[in-house]
Image (spheres, rainbow, N blue to C red):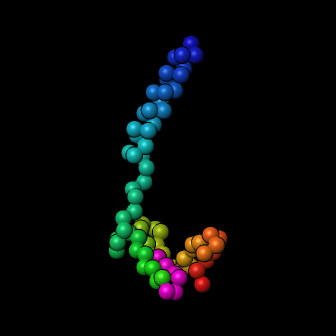
Amino acid sequence: MARGRHAGLAILLMASMVLAGCVSPDMQEWGPDGIEVAVNESAGTATISTHTGDYDIQDDVANLLGCDSNGDFSAAT
């Protein structure tokens, strides 16, 4: 009987992988109708805008992050 349960579980798992793309939300596109990012390397910032459904961000500025010469994680200044 345990073999039947394992087979049923395997079929359910395979079916969920096949159907995952059908029920997931759409991926956002880059560009004026989706996500826009402008990077200013000299200032160490990125300006982000998104216009997707109810979620709207206009010109949100974020600091760029990276590693310094010692390999330590730091924010750009």
Q: Is residue 35 visible?
A: yes
- 42 or 4, nearer to the observer: 42
Image: 10 above or below 70? above
Point 48% across, 32% down: residue: 13
Split into 4 quadrants, where in the image is the N terminus?
Answer: top right
Q: Residue at the location (43% across, 72% down)? A: 50
In the image, which residues are magenta? 42-48
Residue 4, placed above or below residue 40: above
**Residue 36 at x, y percent in the picture:** 40, 74
User: Which quadrant of the rendered structure holds the C terminus?
Assistant: bottom right
Place residue 63 in its image quadrant: bottom right
Q: Nearer the viewer, residue 65 or 5?
A: 65
Q: Residue at x 58, y 80 (%)?
A: 76
Query: In the image as oriented, which residue stretches furthest toward the front?
Result: 70
- The residue furthest bottom is 43
Q: Is residue 58 visible?
A: no
Q: Magenta segment: does it hold 46?
A: yes
Query: Which of 23 and 3 lies nearest the eye of the viewer?
Result: 3
Q: How many marks?
A: 0
Spot occupied by residue 8 in the image (x, y as percentages of width and height): 49, 23
Q: Residue furthest top?
A: 1
Q: Position of residue 68 (x, y in %)?
A: 60, 75
The residue under the point 41% across, 70% down is 35
Direction left: furthest residue: 32
Q: Is residue 77 left or right of residue 28?
A: right
